[in-house]
Image (cartoon, helix red, strand yellow):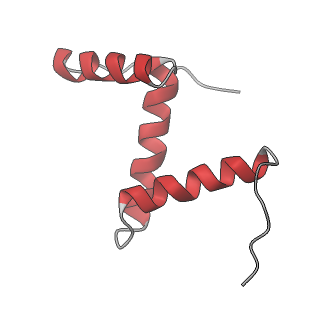
Amino acid sequence: MSNITSIRLPDQIRHKVQIRAKMEHRSISNLIERFIELALISEDNPDLPLQFIKDIEEARTEKALGLAKPFKI
Protein backbone atom coordinates (compact mmCIF):
# COMPACT_ATOMS: atom_id res chain seq x y z
CA MET A 1 0.00 0.00 0.00
CA SER A 2 1.35 3.40 -0.96
CA ASN A 3 1.42 6.40 1.29
CA ILE A 4 0.61 9.77 -0.19
CA THR A 5 3.18 12.50 0.32
CA SER A 6 2.97 16.01 -1.08
CA ILE A 7 6.14 17.76 -2.16
CA ARG A 8 6.70 21.21 -3.55
CA LEU A 9 8.84 21.51 -6.64
CA PRO A 10 10.10 24.69 -8.24
CA ASP A 11 8.14 25.49 -11.41
CA GLN A 12 11.18 24.88 -13.62
CA ILE A 13 11.73 21.36 -12.23
CA ARG A 14 8.00 20.55 -12.29
CA HIS A 15 7.83 21.60 -15.94
CA LYS A 16 10.84 19.42 -16.86
CA VAL A 17 9.33 16.44 -15.02
CA GLN A 18 5.99 16.91 -16.82
CA ILE A 19 7.73 16.94 -20.20
CA ARG A 20 9.84 13.88 -19.37
CA ALA A 21 6.79 12.01 -18.07
CA LYS A 22 4.95 12.63 -21.34
CA MET A 23 7.99 11.55 -23.36
CA GLU A 24 8.33 8.31 -21.39
CA HIS A 25 4.56 7.65 -21.26
CA ARG A 26 4.59 7.66 -17.45
CA SER A 27 2.62 9.47 -14.81
CA ILE A 28 4.43 12.28 -13.04
CA SER A 29 4.36 10.44 -9.72
CA ASN A 30 5.67 7.25 -11.37
CA LEU A 31 8.53 9.16 -12.98
CA ILE A 32 9.46 10.91 -9.72
CA GLU A 33 9.39 7.53 -7.95
CA ARG A 34 11.77 6.12 -10.59
CA PHE A 35 14.11 9.12 -10.25
CA ILE A 36 14.22 8.68 -6.47
CA GLU A 37 14.91 4.95 -6.76
CA LEU A 38 17.77 5.59 -9.21
CA ALA A 39 19.16 8.35 -6.97
CA LEU A 40 19.15 6.06 -3.93
CA ILE A 41 20.87 3.27 -5.87
CA SER A 42 23.42 5.78 -7.19
CA GLU A 43 24.19 7.03 -3.70
CA ASP A 44 24.65 3.45 -2.47
CA ASN A 45 26.96 2.69 -5.43
CA PRO A 46 28.95 5.85 -6.16
CA ASP A 47 31.50 3.92 -8.22
CA LEU A 48 28.89 2.88 -10.83
CA PRO A 49 27.87 5.21 -13.67
CA LEU A 50 24.18 6.09 -13.79
CA GLN A 51 23.76 4.58 -17.26
CA PHE A 52 25.15 1.26 -15.99
CA ILE A 53 22.60 1.30 -13.15
CA LYS A 54 19.79 2.05 -15.64
CA ASP A 55 20.96 -0.84 -17.84
CA ILE A 56 20.90 -3.22 -14.86
CA GLU A 57 17.37 -2.10 -13.95
CA GLU A 58 16.26 -2.57 -17.55
CA ALA A 59 17.77 -6.08 -17.63
CA ARG A 60 15.98 -6.97 -14.38
CA THR A 61 12.69 -5.84 -15.86
CA GLU A 62 13.29 -7.83 -19.04
CA LYS A 63 14.08 -10.92 -16.96
CA ALA A 64 10.93 -10.47 -14.87
CA LEU A 65 8.87 -10.26 -18.08
CA GLY A 66 10.48 -13.41 -19.47
CA LEU A 67 12.36 -11.59 -22.23
CA ALA A 68 15.86 -12.52 -21.05
CA LYS A 69 17.90 -15.12 -22.91
CA PRO A 70 20.63 -17.27 -21.35
CA PHE A 71 24.14 -16.08 -22.10
CA LYS A 72 26.83 -18.70 -22.58
CA ILE A 73 30.51 -17.90 -22.30
Residue 15, percent from left and from top: 25, 15
Q: What is the residue that sits farthest to the bottom in this orientation? A: 73
Q: Residue at x 59, y 24 (%)?
A: 3
Image quadrant in which you'd find residue 73: bottom right
Q: Residue at x 52, y 21 (%)?
A: 26
Query: Residue 58, relative to residue 17: is it above or below?
Result: below
Residue 7, percent from left and from top: 35, 21
Q: Quadrant of the N terminus?
A: top right
Count all numbered tags in the image, as a single digit: 0
Front in this rendered view, residue 50 or 35: 50
Query: Residue 12, relative to residue 61: is it above or below?
Result: above
Residue 13, percent from left and from top: 23, 24
Front in this rendered view, residue 4 or 42: 42
* Residue 5 visible in the picture: no
Residue 54, percent from left and from top: 48, 52
Front in this rendered view, residue 24 or 43: 24
Query: Residue 65, relative to residue 18: is it above or below?
Result: below
Query: Residue 34, relative to residue 72: is it above or below?
Result: above
Describe residue 4's horizontal placement relative to residue 35 as left or right: right
Image quadrant in which you'd find residue 65: top right
* Residue 67 visible in the picture: yes
Q: Residue at x 49, y 37 (%)?
A: 34
Q: Residue at x 54, y 20 (%)?
A: 4
